[in-house]
Amino acid sequence: MTAARHRAGPGRIVVVGDLITDVVAVLGGPLATGSDTPATIRVTGGGQAANTAAWLAAQGVPVTMVGAVGDDDAGRDRVAELERAGVDCAVERHVGRTTGTVIVLTGDGERTMVTERGANLRLGAGHVDAALAAAPDARHLHLSAYPLLDVGSRGAGLRALAAARERGLTTSVDAASAAPLRRVGAAAFLTWVRDVDLLLVNADEAAVLAGGLDPAAQARALTATARRVVVKRGAAGAVWADRAATVSVAPTRRVAVADVTGAGDAFAAGLLSAWLAGAEPRAALDRAGDLGALAVSSIGARPTA
């Protein structure tokens, strides 16, 4: 990245991945299997990629969301929400498909997701190419790994990374979720994301991809695949490592937690906006941590108005 680019800010970021309806249930106590559990329930926009795009727009970063929805009311609502938030939407609609939905059970600093990806499985490589062609001012492509983790959308995820490189864009990937990573296998995933400029993983994903090492060692090990790696550790902070042997650690943040849904997506937006504008690793991690802390202070995965 050039000094001129640093001065100009991060530039347009194209975000590729899922656009979802989240049904978030913040549990009032332990889940009473087979009975009733009190909860605070909200229906909101979600999807890892869409959440990151919304947090980028909230920081004034030009951003395009590339994804797929069904030709249904939920899909129209999800796109309208993003557009109101300042996100440019390159979202294809699929007749006969439903917009994806995730039921999120959250409490005690953890969340469990029950997922129907719906029309997200229909995201096509051709649509990704067209969206990139329509964004000539793009400087960076950020891929939520969910498209890679399912055979139905894998072609679109792979094409997004290849097309970005062809256009001279820098690239980043968020590893998305530990369980589907285990299903596809670490070796396959690391092949798909080889030589991306930045790979983001949380503690569980780092364990799948790099084994049971300490976070700094996991990050260093993963730089054999990605040029830079950030291991997100929630309330324990984060670790950055790159191929120049730089290791930076962000401090723990103590905040009142309402809902952890989308915290990692906000973290990614803060990291990208700072790093692409030229911030050093520690400063980029600090900005990421600030947005992650803001995200957990309210229910839902998007910035509050």
Image (cartoon, helix red, strand yellow):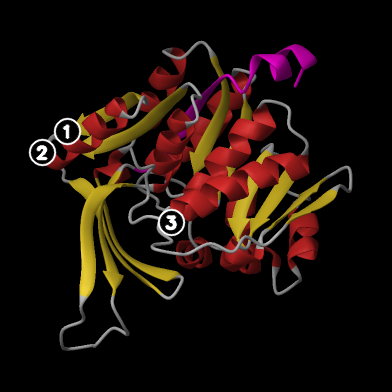
Tag 1 near tag 2, CB within 8 Å = yes
Picture quadrant of residue 86: top left
Residue at image location 65% in from the left, 19% down from the top = 168
What residue is shown with label 1?
A: 76
Question: In this view of the protein, which residue sits in the foreground, 86 or 123?
Answer: 86
Q: Residue at x 46, y 71 (%)?
A: 109
Viewer-proximal residue among 254 and 159: 254
Q: Residue at x 41, y 13 (%)?
A: 134
Q: CA distance from mark 3 to mark 1?
A: 28 Å
Q: Quadrant of the C terminus?
A: top left
Amino acid residing under circle 2: Asp
Q: Is residue 142 left or right of residue 100?
A: right
Q: Spatial distance from mark 3 to mark 2, Cα to Cα?
A: 29 Å
Q: What kind of residue is marked 3? A: Ser
Q: Which mark is residue 237?
A: none
Which span is picked out in magenta?
A: 1-18
The residue under label 2 is 73
Q: Is residue 277 above or below residue 299?
A: above
Instruction: Please give the residue where the numbered disc 3 appears in the rendered image.
Output: 297
Q: Nearer the viewer, residue 204 or 258?
A: 258
Q: Is residue 194 left or right of residue 149?
A: right
